[in-house]
Amino acid sequence: MQWLVEQGYEVIACCLNVGENKDLTLIKEKALKVGASESIMLDKVDTFADEYLSYAIKGNSLYEQTYPLVSALSRPLIAKELVKMAQEKGAEYIAHGCTGKGNDQVRFEVAIHSIDPSLKTLAPVRDWGFSREAEIDYALKHDIPIPIDLDSPYSIDQNLWGRSNECGILEDPYAEPPEDAYELTQSIADSPDEPSVIELTFTAGVPTAINGEQMALHELIASLNSLGGIHGVGRITHVEMLAQCGILTHSEKDLIHQGLRSIEADYENGDVVFTAAAEDIHLNIEKLLIEKIGPTGGKMHTGRSRNDQVATDMHLYMVKEVNAIVHLIEQLQTTIAERAEENIDVIMPGYTHLQRAQPILFAHHIMSYFWMLQRDKERLTDSLKRISLSPLGAGALAGTTYPIDQPMTRTLLGFSGLYMNSMDAVSDRDYLLETMNNLNLIMMHLSRFSEEIILWCTHEFNFIALSDAFSTGSSIMPQKKNPDMAELIRGKAGTVAGRYMGLLMTMKGLPLAYNKDMQEDKKPSFEAVADTKKSLNIFNGMIRTMTLNKEEMALNDFSNATEFADYLVTLGVPFREAHALTGQLVYSCIQKNQLLMDVPLETYRSIHPSITEEVYTSLTPAAAVNRRQNLNGTGTDAVLQQIKEGKTLISR
């Protein structure tokens, strides 16, 4: 700004706070000191969060699928506010200090021109060949305080969403980055040994609360940034630990990181070819790394074996997939609760032995599956404490001679615990068997529900109609509409159970520690997870789109017989006698082709003289249902309370 003033321009400084956490008062004073005629500070952190970051969160926007955009998200907002201010002040130019590498300069100038084509831009680095080094030298000679010098001339872009560092020493993969490059995240050595567990509440795809405490989005993001920094988020696991322990140099660590990121990018672009000659995926990656960065790539494997590495991979995979399945269960539970609530007045026959038994609410029937799924979810959640154990460092079976820091890698990888015995660590497959058994129970529940849906779709029941998206026609019989998705899910339940039994039989005779038989854990585990996730997804859509034939569910049968027996009990008849009298009456009705509602009052009074017209009211399906208001009964109020409690469990 001082240089622009020297060139004859009147400069109005405009600074936006988008979450850099800087003192705006000091910035304002600095601008006035170096010659600005006016210094305007705009606090836009809430606007940045609500109008920009919320969409990035919803879209899971990651640059090259790796890290969040930082500067690129805030530039449009800054450009918009600069143009607005320039128009208010009658300015001819908007000046910026972008370094000339291209991205930021283009973003600013294109955005400014698109909003107001009449405004011109000034960029000293472009218009006067003012290099970064020249800018630094100018500031030092004119006693203008800046946060960098010629020895550390790297660029820092920071806002609420993150921090991006580049230039200078950071461009050299062989040089160790200065510690201040990690300003937002502390070293692993200084991080807590125990992880922090938080619960985020989302509303319409945007986080709104941490551990139940409602927050504005910008406050919530700032809190998560602080917590992540305390726990060393942003540092990389095994190689980071090797450098921290002095087993690798920091330059070797950075070179390995750079090589791995490059291999990852090559893989995403389809440019990686794996070979059988390298034996497995781990040695393939190591071979590619050595090709990229030289012999240093061979140091990545220091202090670990394929045995503990593969086990670590499987633990990480299963933690991720169990959480994903829990989420899918909650989606299905939500759909079940919604369908139950919107059909709370629908009465259907309840069955035992597949024989009509008593009237129940349709909502009560399908909510029974909600609670089965709730137990499934609780089992999965409980299993995470046994899945989330780190085997890294166990080596082949006996540990390692290197002075590694296993609590550090455990924390970095997000595990909640560490195996206390190295032989157990590399040979344990209990967590896979436990998960697969939990998946068996989920699939068994879906299979039972599928069987009912299949029955309800038949002409004999005709309670529901499935969407065409979840049904198929016959290749020869044009009248058919087959519930194929329900049948396939029912079939998959047997397949998932078979995979569990197969792995159980593989493990039952294995001595300690690792044996090659154990590689047979991958295929059944992956397939059981995939089948369960697909089944939950499909089932959710099937339930959400099915149509109820409410008229067909109407009760024209003897499922109200128990109501008459209970009615007799209210008149003082012992239940066993009432049961026998009702049975005789039902038999008589069958002979006469009558229902209980058709029986004349005189006939009822011949059974018991105190029977009145009230008996017909007590025999209606609605009365039968709503007399059962105990906590887990089928009464309307009881079921509504059940739905409410179910929704509360999901929201947690």
Image (tube, rainbow, N blue to C red):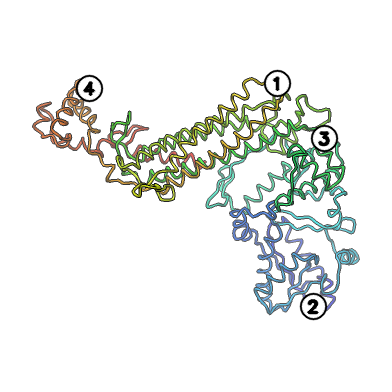
Q: CA distance from mark 1 to mark 4?
A: 63 Å
Seen at 32% across and 32% down, the residue is 351
CB-based contact (under 8 Å), mark 3 and mark 2: no
Determine which residue is flagged by label 2: 9
- Of labels 3 and 2, earlier in sequence is 2
Q: Amino acid at mark 2?
A: Tyr
Secondary structure beneath disc 4?
A: helix
**Residue 493's spot in the image, x, y percent?**
49, 34
Q: Which mark is residue 512?
A: 1
- Of labels 4 and 3, earlier in sequence is 3
**Residue 304's spot in the image, x, y percent?**
78, 32
- Of labels 1 and 2, earlier in sequence is 2
CB-based contact (under 8 Å), mark 1 and mark 4: no
**Residue 440's spot in the image, x, y percent?**
51, 31
Nearer to us of marks 1 and 4 is 1
Q: Is residue 592 left or right of residue 35?
A: left
Secondary structure beneath disc 2?
A: loop
Determine which residue is flagged by label 4: 575
Q: Amino acid at mark 3?
A: Thr
Q: Which mark is residue 302?
A: 3
Nearer to us of marks 3 and 2 is 3
Nearer to us of marks 3 and 1 is 1
Q: Is residue 437 left or right of residue 414?
A: left
Q: CA distance from mark 3 to mark 2?
A: 60 Å
CB-based contact (under 8 Å), mark 1 and mark 2: no
Task: Name the foreground residue: 1 vs 469.
Answer: 469
Seen at 70% across and 77% down, the residue is 119
Crowding near the residue tagged with mark 3, few <14, some 14–19, many ≥20 C-alpha atoms within 10 Å: some
Q: CA distance from mark 3 to mark 1?
A: 24 Å
Secondary structure beneath disc 1?
A: loop
Seen at 62% across and 60% down, the residue is 52
